[in-house]
Image: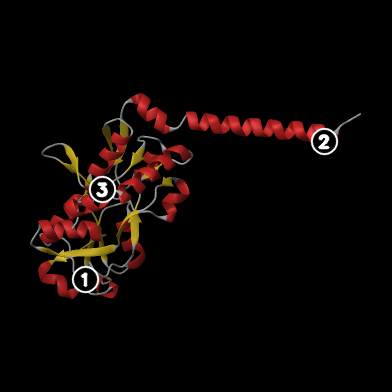
Amino acid sequence: MFNVKKLLLAVILAVTAISFGAFANEAHASKVEDIQSRGYLLVGSTGDYKPMSYLNKETGQYEGFDAEAVTLLAQSLGVPVRYVPTTWSTLTADTLAGKFDLAMCGITRTFARQQKMALSHGYLVFGKTILTRKEDAKKFKTISDLNKKSVRVMVNPGGTNEKFALANLPDCTLIVHPANAEIPGLVAEGKADIMITETMEARRYVRDNAKLAAPLIDEPFTRNNFGILMQQGDQLFLNYVNLWMEEMEFNGTFDRLEDKYIK
C-alpha cells in the first residue's frame, strides 16, 4: 500500500541532506581556508586615497589607515598581504572577477555596491565635503555656491565623488581627472576651484598643504561609513572579517589608527 507519510519523510531527508552538503561544500570552499593554504591575502587597492590607502611611489609601500588595518587582518589569518592594483572605475568588475580576496581602500558603503557585492560592517563616520584654495574658502558655503558654471569642480572617475557631483552639481563645470591623488595639488595650483572628497581625505590634505582649506568639513553634505568589499556567496569569510572588525573596535585599534592617520 502506498505510504504518503513515508514518501514525504524521504523527500524531507533528501532535501536536508542536499542542503547540508551544499553548506558543507560552501564552508570548505571559503576564502578563509584558501587564503591560509595559499599563504597570503590578496588585497585590492586604488592606492590613491590619503589617508586610507596610498601607494608611496618613493618606497613602493602602501600607507594609511586601511593599509595598516588590512595588514593586521592578514596577520589574524597568519599570512602577509599581497596588493592587487585596481581603480575606482574598475573596482566593481575586479571584485566580481575575483581578482583579490577583498578590497580595503576608503570604499564607501552604498546600496548599489551591496546589490552586487558583499560589504563588511561599517567603520569610521565621514561625509562628502570640499577642498578648495584657502583664499577662496569663504566663497563656498552651500551646494548652491558650488553649482555654477563658473565653478570648476574636479573629481576622479568611477567613484562616489563623481556620482555626488553628477547628482548634485549639474550646472558646475565638471572636470574628471584620472588620478585622485593628484587632484588636491591641482586645486592648490588653481587648475580647479573645488575637489569633491570625503572629510577623512580633506583633513589629511589640509594638514599637508598650507594652500588648501576645507571650509565645510564640520558640516558635510552626506554621512556614511567605509566598508571592506568582497564577492558575495562566502558567508564564512564575511563573518570572519566582521568579527575581526568588531575586535579592532573593542580593543581600540581603530581609534589608534584614526589618531595616527586622520586626526
Callout in the foreground (1, 3): 3
Question: In what element is the residue under mark 2?
Answer: helix
Which colour style is shown?
secondary structure
According to the picture, the residue beneath numbered tag 1 turns out to be 150
Q: Quadrant of the C terminus?
A: bottom left
According to the picture, the residue beneath numbered tag 2 turns out to be 5
Q: What type is the residue that disc 1 sits on?
A: Ser
Q: Outermost residue, top direction?
A: 37
Query: Residue at the location (46% across, 38% down)?
Result: 236
Residue 117 position, x and y percent, is 44, 45
Q: If you read the primary sequence from the N terminus, does the residue marked by circle 1 or circle 2 appear first?
A: 2
Residue 156 position, x and y percent, is 26, 53
- Please state if 204 lies on the left or on the right of 14 as rendered: left
Which quadrant would residue 42 be assigned to in this image?
Answer: top left
Residues under labels 1 and 3: Cα distance?
Answer: 44 Å
Q: Outermost residue, front direction?
A: 251
- Looking at the image, residue 179 lies above or below residue 41: below
Q: If you read the primary sequence from the N terminus, does the residue marked by circle 3 or circle 2 appear first?
A: 2
Q: What type is the residue that disc 2 sits on?
A: Lys
Question: In what element is the residue under mark 1?
Answer: loop
Query: Residue at the location (33% across, 33% down)?
Result: 77
Query: Residue at the location (69% across, 30% down)?
Result: 14
Q: What type is the residue that disc 3 sits on?
A: Thr
Q: Nearer the viewer, residue 129 or 28?
A: 28
Which mark identifies residue 253? 3
